[in-house]
Amino acid sequence: MQISSILDIVDGSLLNSPSISFIYSIKTNPKKVKEGDLFIVKDLNDIEMAIKNGAFAIILDNNSPILDNEIAWIKVKNIDDSIIKLIRYKLSILNLEAYFCDKVTYQLLKIYSSNFPKSIKLIPNKLENLFKNIDEIEENDVIFSFNTEILNKIYPENKDFSKITTKLEIENLIEHSLFETSFSHNNIYFSKLKIPSLYLAQFLRVYNFLGGNIDFGKLKLFNNLKPLFIDRNLNFIEFGKSDRFIICQDIKNLYANEILYMKIKYKYAKTIFITSEYTEYLKKDEQINIRNLDELKPILRKLKFNAIYLMGFNYNQVQTYILKSEKRLTLF
């Protein structure tokens, strides 16, 4: 891309008279910069490394000394706006399908994106991270984002994914547990899928969009309402082999529906709600607040429960924490 074109796209000012006139690619991480790249500055301390790694151009919205007069130095009013303009330009020359979806659908697409005959590209929530794979987005690719504001800015011709798929008729629903269901859809019977009924709509949208070409075994990678079964000593135990489990969630906009789901579907058992910060979806006396995971096990040892719904921590964090606790115990 020509430097003159970049100036027009970002409405920037050239601060010097460089000897180069073009760049090959765009980077936001100075460690990833290669010879010929444009480096977008988020931290002025990164500039020296980017130049050392071969940057042909620097774009920034703060004042900085020109460390190398051979390369282009471009000043803009706002670096985030410039990132959006550059991405929008790069995508505007391609014929793409673009959809916005909820976070649960996004997670399922992430699991199954390799099954789609076309190439699915998932837009990260941080725009600067998109430059890691923007050069891989090609004609007729399909892009998804759960951030409608970002998607509208970078590719305005987008659609609501929940409105373009076929009807989601579900029959013969059997809820074997909070996190395992059987049902019929479009004359196909799905037996004991490891997905809660709460998220069947999102699952079936992805299933239909992919033409049924999915591996149900991959649902083990879906962590929403996924239980971590524990024994009386708070150690991990095989799936379904205990009446005690922990469910973890750190996506705040999923709290309300999951709390209601737990209260309705598991009302016959004892559920404890623990959170890293108090939530409006529960009364204060219904929730226990902890600052970090080190406070979790001492609390659980004192309580009688069947289920723990833990807010503010994700599945992998809690799994790692409990495994480390188990290893520490075995050392003694």
Image (cartoon, rainbow, N blue to C red):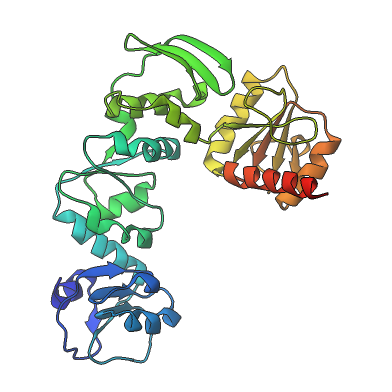
Q: Quadrant of residue 159?
A: top left
Tell me if residue 233 comes above or below residue 93 in the rendering: above
Q: Position of residue 226 (x, y in %)?
A: 57, 32
Tell whether 121 sits left or right of 271.
left
Q: Quadrant of residue 287?
A: top right
Tell whether 196 sits left or right of 75.
right
> What is the residue that sits farthest to the right in this orientation?
302
> What is the residue that sits farthest to the front in this orientation?
331
Q: Position of residue 10 (x, y in %)?
A: 24, 71
Tell whether 132 sits left or right of 330.
left
Residue drawn at x 24%, y 42% is 119
Q: Quadrant of the N terminus?
A: bottom left
Tell me if residue 152 comes above or below residue 77 in the rendering: above
Q: Is residue 39 visible?
A: yes
Q: Is residue 290 visible?
A: no
Return the residue nearer the eye: 5 or 307.
Answer: 307
Tell me if residue 275 comes above or below residue 34 in the rendering: above
Tell me if residue 259 comes above or below residue 23 in the rendering: above
Q: Position of residue 289 (x, y in %)?
A: 74, 46
Q: Position of residue 302 (x, y in %)?
A: 86, 36
Residue drawn at x 25%, y 74% is 37
